[in-house]
Amino acid sequence: MSEDKDTRNIAESKREKDGAVYYIRGRRTVDGKQYQRYAVATHFVERGEDYIKVLRQYIQPLYKEGDIISMSEKVISMCQNNTVEMKDVKLGFWAKFLSKFASKSTAGIAMDEPYKLQLAINMKGLPLILWASFCSAVGKLFHKRGIFYEIVGQDVAGIDGFYSHSAFELYHTLAVLNPKEPEKVCEKIKTELGYSCILADANDLNVEILGLSPDVREKGDDYAVGLIKDNPAGQADELTPFIIIRQVPDDEKDDMEV
C-alpha cells in the first residue's frame, strides 16, 4: 500500500461504517498467521477525557470478537492528563548546552530540543543525564546509537511533545509523558470492554510495548511488536491512535474491509 510523505491516511484506503471512519493499513504475518490492520480515526483527544468512553465510541462500531486493539500511548496519557507544559519547565544551562550536541531524530523531537532535555533532567537528575550524555558521546565514536536512552530509561525515551511543527498548536508547548500504570490500563479495558489490547510507544524507528491485556501478554512482547512493527498508527498528524488488528481467514485474498 502506498503512503504520502506526511500521512498514511490516503483516500484510496479510507472506509466508513456506522459513522466510524477507518483506513486499511495492510497486512502483517506473525507466527505464521496473517493479520489485517485498520487505523481508526478519532477526534483530537483532549486532556482528562475518559479513554473507556473514547474507545467505546470509536471501536465498538467496528469491533469483532477476536480483534486486538493497539493504542497509542499518547492518547492514554492525554486522558490521564499525564502531561507537562513548557511554561512549567525552567530552562537551565546544562539543557541549553547539552542539547547542542544531541543527535536529531527522524522519528520526532529528540534531546536536541532544550526543553525536552530539561524535562529529562528534572525527571532523572543532572548526574544521570551527564553520565548518559558522556556514554552516548563515547558510543558515537564506535558508531553505536541509543546508549543515552538505554541509561536514562523508557520514561525519558517516551517523552513526546514540544513539537513546534505540529499541526496541533497544543503540542507546540505541551509534553506528553508515558501512561501511568499501563498494564492496569490494559486490564481495565479488557475487563470493562472485553477488548484484547496493546499499549505501545511506537514510531517509524522503534516499537516499545508498555502494556498488554492478560490474554495478549501470554503471547509475549515479540508477538505484539510483530503486529505493529511498521507503526500503522502513523508518525504525523493522522489522528488514528487506535488500530484494530484482525486475523485474516486463510481463503481471503484481497484487503478485508471491516
Image: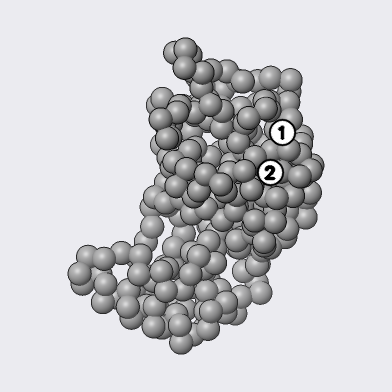
Say left or right for 114 vs 45.
Answer: left
User: How would you rate the neighbour count of disc 2 (Cα within 10 Å): few for under 14, some for 14-19, many for 20 or more?
Assistant: few
Q: Which percent across, then down, holds residue 7?
A: 48, 36
The number of callouts visible is: 2
Q: Name the secondary structure under disc 2.
A: loop
Q: Residue furthest bottom?
A: 127
Say left or right for 66 vs 79.
Answer: left
Residue occupying image coordinates x 42% and y 68%? 149
Q: Quadrant of the N terminus?
A: top left
Q: Nearer the viewer, residue 221 or 164?
A: 221
Say left or right for 69 vs 219.
Answer: right
Say left or right for 196 vs 120.
Answer: right
Q: Is residue 97 visible?
A: no
Q: Quadrant of the C terminus?
A: top right
Query: Which residue in the structure is indicated by mark 2?
Result: 44
Q: Which is nearer the N-term, disc 2 or disc 1?
A: 2
Query: Which residue in the structure is indicated by mark 1?
Result: 58
Q: Which percent across, then down, holds residue 95?
A: 47, 78
Q: Is residue 141 above or below residue 202?
A: below
Q: Which percent across, then down, holds residue 38?
A: 56, 29
Residue occupying image coordinates x 74% and y 30%? 60
Label 2, label 1: how many angstroms apart (C-alpha)? 12 Å
Amino acid type indicated by mark 1:
Tyr
Q: Name the secondary structure under disc 1.
A: helix
Residue occupying image coordinates x 65% and y 72%? 87
Amino acid type indicated by mark 2:
Phe
